[in-house]
Image: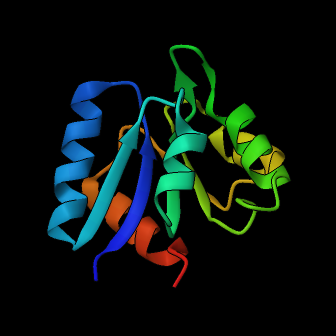
Amino acid sequence: MKKRILYVEDDGDMLEVVSEFMKFEDYEVITDNGKSTWEKLQQHAVGLILLDENLNWGWGSDLCVLLKADQKTAHIPVVLISALSNIDEIATACGADGYIRKPFDIYDVIDTVSQYYLH
């Protein structure tokens, strides 16, 4: 059975590139622009959430706070992705388990997902 992650990103190109690489690493990637995250989490059991910080409609870190506050989703590791220079501080403040700084090497994403994936 494939490992499943939820990737919340509203940049279609970024979504496609990361999703394709993760499929090669034997992950099933469920995608969302952040507006139906709760529905996707009800439909699919995931072992990790990749979450872009700068979404068109708001901040990924705000969504992370909500995910970590809900007992149904608090156990799922969340990894923020951002080009912001203080993403490490943002990740800590919102309770994210890790972060990936843009621009990134795709192997950084693969390594980070592997490190935090809920087994």
Q: Which residue is rendered at x = 25% and y = 61% of the image?
A: 22
Q: Which residue is rendered at x = 42% and y = 60% of the image?
A: 5
The one nearer the camera, 73 or 105, is: 73
Q: Position of residue 111 (x, y in %)?
A: 38, 70
Q: Which residue is rendered at x = 55% and y = 42% of the image?
A: 39
Q: Residue 79, located in which quarter of the rendered image?
A: bottom right
Q: Is residue 77 left or right of residue 30?
A: right
Of the 4 image quadrants, the one containing the N terminus is bottom left
- The total number of labels drawn is 0
State whether residue 108 is above or below residue 32.
Answer: below
Question: Can the viewer see residue 99?
Answer: no
Q: Which residue is rendered at x = 33% and y = 66% of the image?
A: 110
Q: Residue 118, located in which quarter of the rendered image?
A: bottom right
Query: What coloring was used for the rendering?
Result: rainbow
Q: Residue furthest front?
A: 43
Question: Can the viewer see residue 110?
Answer: yes
Q: Residue furthest top?
A: 57
Q: Position of residue 102 (x, y in %)?
A: 42, 38
Q: Is residue 14 left or right of residue 91?
A: left
Q: Position of residue 51 (x, y in %)?
A: 53, 43
The one nearer the camera, 11 or 46, is: 46
Q: Position of residue 35 (x, y in %)?
A: 54, 26
Q: Is residue 92 left or right of residue 31?
A: right
State whether residue 49 is above or below residue 11.
Answer: below
State whether residue 51 is above or below residue 2.
Answer: above
Q: Is residue 29 left or right of residue 99?
A: left
State whether residue 99 is above or below residue 12.
Answer: below
